[in-house]
Amino acid sequence: MRIVTASSYEAAIFNLQQRQQGLDKAQMQLTSGKRVNLASDDPTAAARAERAQASMDRSDADKRSLDASRNVMSITESAMGDSVELLQTARETLMAAGNGTYSDGERKTLALKLVNIRNQLLSVANRPDGGGGFVFGGQGSATPPFVDTPSGVVFQGQSGELMASTGERLSLTVDGDQAWLKARSGNGVFTTAPVSGSNSGNAWITPGTVTAPNDVPYLTGGSSPNYTVQFNVSGTGTTYDILENGTSIGTGTFKPDKAIAIPGRGMSVTVKGSPANGDQFAIGEAKNDLNIFTSLNNVIAALNSSNQSGPAIVQAVNTGTLELDSVLTNMQSSRTAVGESLNRMDGIEDRIGTLKLAAATEKSNAEDLDMTQAISNFQNQQVGYQAALQSYASVQKLSLFQYING
């Protein structure tokens, strides 16, 4: 076989270039600390590293959403704590107003204190989240969600919650409508109240109790009838009629402090004091529509009224106390939900950290360099390149012309 000198030189130079490229690649790996610096170095490993990096980026985004939600929920929990303290103060003030020895002036002083508490509660309900929104803004509100109108405080936001963009359920707001304006009215099953404008006696009605849950129409999922206890006074005797949607379903002789049972309906109420002829008390279904501000407005109006009879004050105080208890229960439930959300975030943070660590490990396995092996490889490449240079230099001297010249 005939070997051309030029071809031999070309082959040698090509091999030198290949070894130099290998040496450069080994040097780049050592200086970068990565086995894969370009997708062409190892396409499969580069794809694995890219997927791992995307997973790490998602974990970082989830962590930012988690931090935002935790900040809002912390502010919300603090706001709810403030509201609970204010409501408890309002309850104590209202209980004091029931003192029969108080004058109209003293009750008006307590009413003024309740006005201040109401205003503070409105401020808490409109507490900002520090990011341009409001913690009780529902599904988002650029303006304070609760507005004090002549007819009372109304919620002008959108009910619901604003959720963070993440796979986990993370709230950025709380449904203010539900927390502040949707407590359960009455005793939770039914409501009791004097019929407005019909009573002239000195009597008041209690919240009532459930005696047979299976018989209560409001618990069976059927109709929602209205009941009326109507009193008839003749001489020294007092009787009452029980009406269901205007139709009599029972009668009885009135005895103060003795429970009045609604026949076959699993409910009983107690009317105290001395009802007058024609006095009426209404019983209806409890609903989730108790507005904390409306309750306070009603109590404040009652305490500001002059020359109120003792039973009227007792009725206002008892009703107001019952409603405040219901509002407190509703607020405590909302606060508990926020607390559970904060506790759940600790677990979410751990999961995000675990996922990010797993992705980082996968990326490292795909592209990071085994330094010991890389140093050994670099040294082998270096020795091989030096040997190739020396070999090429020696081969260059083996030509006929150099031999003749020598």
Image (tube, helix red, strand yellow):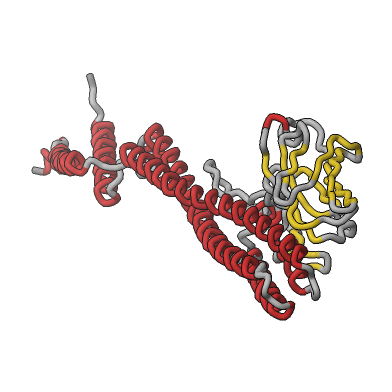
Which residue: 77% across, 69% down?
A: 301
**Residue 329: percent from left, percent from top:** 59, 52
Which residue: 46% across, 46% down?
A: 344
Give the quadrant of residue 304.
Answer: bottom right
Give the quadrant of residue 45.
Answer: top left
**Residue 60: percent from left, percent from top:** 46, 50
Instruction: In this rendered view, identify the residue nearer to me: 9 or 277.
Output: 277
Asked if residue 123 shows in the view, the reply is no
Which residue: 53% across, 54% down?
A: 69
| 331 relative to 8, above or below | below
User: Which quadrant is home to the N terminus?
Assistant: top left
Instruction: In this rendered view, identify the residue nearer to me: 406 or 223.
Output: 223
Residue furthest front as drawn: 236
Instruction: In this rendered view, identify the residue nearer to me: 333 or 307.
Output: 307
**Residue 360: percent from left, percent from top:** 36, 43
Asked if residue 248 shows in the view, the reply is yes
The count of marks equals 0
**Residue 395: percent from left, percent from top:** 15, 37
